[in-house]
């Protein structure tokens, strides 16, 4: 039994018109008629009463309709399941800053190394990452602040040095406008505050790069940013670097459960590791 015959029967039953059914199915009316005829021959029963101005289901057609819907749905599910055999699925989540610093640029590169992989990517908080990873809701986690657990492996993926930048118009008196404070973690924040006590009076405090950059786009300010993020704005002539804060930096970490037995996940981690090795070798 061809699933297309059942789909055609259901379309005719719904539209009560061979022409409309043919249009909806992108078929000719003769093709629709032929399929219905073959169904009637298969079941040895008339399925429609063909009047001049109307088309009605026969008693046999009424009986077949629910079975046709069930069979068509089952066959469609079977076909979808067969198609999924060659597709591997991977769930990866990151904090917003890890996404901006690494995953946004690296996801295409990682994906290009693996064929037939469908990636589900999410952005969430660090607390959610830890919970989701331990509950096996995600396969991999990326964060700038690795969470402590005896059950996970942690791989450092990238490091970007922090530096002090300002809007071009503020280059002459920059520190008077140090009004964006980004949270880089307790120890790093303490070092920054000692070097730049003005930052304690910042008008906006946030842990999100996106929030800080959005504010910076509409307010001339001084800001501490990772060099990799700021470089684009420097190239555009919107920011000027005032001072490097090296060795202060922000890092991105890949975290996964130690008991990783899934072959596709192991392969995915290997790709991350290889990319890291290639980057260090450059």
Image (spheres, helix red, strand yellow):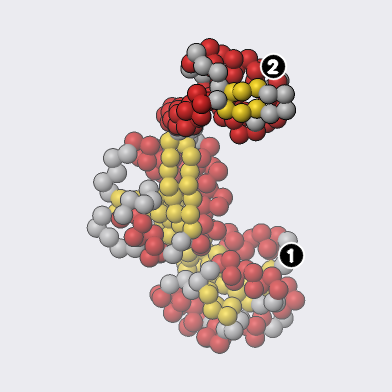
Tell me residue 128's x, y (percent): 39, 62
Q: Which of 178 and 55 is in front in this view?
A: 55
Q: What residue do we see at 70% from left, 60% from top?
A: 235
Q: Name the residue beneath numbered marker 2.
A: 30
Tell me residue 108's x, y (percent): 55, 43
- Residue 269 in view here: yes
Image quarter of residue 187: bottom left
In the displayed structure image, the side of residue 78 where residue 244 appears, left or right: right
Tell me residue 275's x, y (percent): 47, 43
The label shown at residue 237 is 1
Q: Which of 3 and 195 is in front in this view?
A: 3
Is the residue 173 above or below the residue 231 in the image?
below
**Label 1: how many residues lie within 10 Å, few (<14), some (14-19) or many (20+)?**
few
Instruction: Answer with mark 1 or mark 2, whichever residue precedes in sequence.
Output: 2
The label shown at residue 32 is none
Is the residue 256 above or below the residue 83 in the image?
below
Is the residue 174 above or below the residue 270 in the image?
below
């Amino acid at each position: 039994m061809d699933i297309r015959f059942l789909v055609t029967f259901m379309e005719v039953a719904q539209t009560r018109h061979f022409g409309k059914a043919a249009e909806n199915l992108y078929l000719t009316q003769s093709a629709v008629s032929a399929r219905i005829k073959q169904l009637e021959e298969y079941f040895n029963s008339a399925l429609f009463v063909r009047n001049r101005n109307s088309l009605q289901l026969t008693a046999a057609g009424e009986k077949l309709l629910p079975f046709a819907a069930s069979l068509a749905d089952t066959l469609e599910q079977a076909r979808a399941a067969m198609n999924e055999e060659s597709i591997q699925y991977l769930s990866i989540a990151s904090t917003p800053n890890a996404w901006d610093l690494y995953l946004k640029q690296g996801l295409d590169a990682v994906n290009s190394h693996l064929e037939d992989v469908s990636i589900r990517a999410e952005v969430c908080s660090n607390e959610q990452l830890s919970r989701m990873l331990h509950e096996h809701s995600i396969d991999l986690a990326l964060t700038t602040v690795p969470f402590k657990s005896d059950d996970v492996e942690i791989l450092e993926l990238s490091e970007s040095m922090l530096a002090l930048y300002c809007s071009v118009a503020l280059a002459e008196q920059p520190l008077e406008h140090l009004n964006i404070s980004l949270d880089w973690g307790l120890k790093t924040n303490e070092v920054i505050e000692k070097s730049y006590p003005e930052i304690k009076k910042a008008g906006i405090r946030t842990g999100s790069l996106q929030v800080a950059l959005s504010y910076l786009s509409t307010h001339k300010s001084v800001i501490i940013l990772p060099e990799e993020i700021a470089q684009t704005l420097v190239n555009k002539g919107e920011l000027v670097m005032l001072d490097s804060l090296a060795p202060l930096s922000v890092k991105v970490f890949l975290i996964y459960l130690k008991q990783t037995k899934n072959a596709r996940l192991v392969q995915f981690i290997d790709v991350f590791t290889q990319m890291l090795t290639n980057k260090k070798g450059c």
